Image: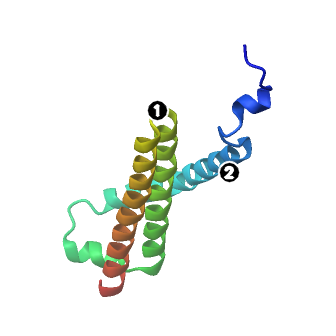
């Protein structure tokens, strides 16, 4: 039988306040992705059968390039948040947990930056 208080037993297991920010960020990115993905799918369907020049000129339009950048940023941030939850919930060994969280952050930032660079390069050089 433990003589520790309930607060003492959960001390160090994390604060309840941090999960709310994460939850809201994930919901807001999901909400932002809805119109962006609909726009992207309709646009890609309209571009079926076109050549590379047509696509690059399509993406060179400032509004389309900005929308594509927003799609890339929201997608990779949403992915980072979702994978973080999966890792925190299902990887219980501390070393693996930390390593996978760092890898998740590194991969999402790296891939998101590469995609953003590609969009900017096509939009500017288009």
Circle 1 SS class? helix
Quadrant in the rendering for residue 19: top right
- Give residue 78's position: percent from left, percent from top: 50, 52
Secondary structure under badge 2? helix
Is residue 78 rendered to the left or right of residue 28? Answer: left
Q: Residue at 38% of width from left, 54% of height from top?
A: 103
Say if 75 sits above or below 69 in the image. Answer: above
Say left or right for 25 vs 110.
right
Seen from the viewer's position, the closer of residues 13 and 19 is 13
Q: Residues within 10 Å of mark 1 (few under 14, many from 20)?
A: few
Quarter-wise, where is residue 46 in the image?
bottom left
Q: Mark 2 points at which residue?
A: 21
From what the image shows, is residue 75 above or below residue 116? above
Q: Name the residue under label 1.
A: 90
**Is 36 on the left or on the right of 118, as rendered?**
right
Point out the image quarter for the C terminus: bottom left
């Amino acid at each position: 039988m433990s003589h520790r208080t309930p607060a003492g037993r959960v001390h160090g297991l994390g604060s309840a306040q941090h999960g709310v920010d994460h939850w809201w960020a994930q919901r807001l990115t999901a909400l932002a992705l809805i119109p962006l993905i609909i726009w992207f799918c309709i646009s890609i369907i309209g571009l079926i059968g076109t050549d590379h020049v047509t696509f690059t000129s399509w993406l060179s339009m400032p509004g389309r390039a900005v929308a594509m950048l927003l799609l890339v940023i929201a997608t990779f941030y949403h992915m980072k948040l979702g994978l973080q939850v999966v890792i925190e919930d299902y990887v219980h060994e501390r070393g693996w947990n930390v390593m996978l969280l760092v890898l998740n952050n590194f991969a999402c930032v790296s891939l998101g930056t590469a995609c953003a660079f590609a969009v900017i390069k096509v939009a500017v050089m288009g």
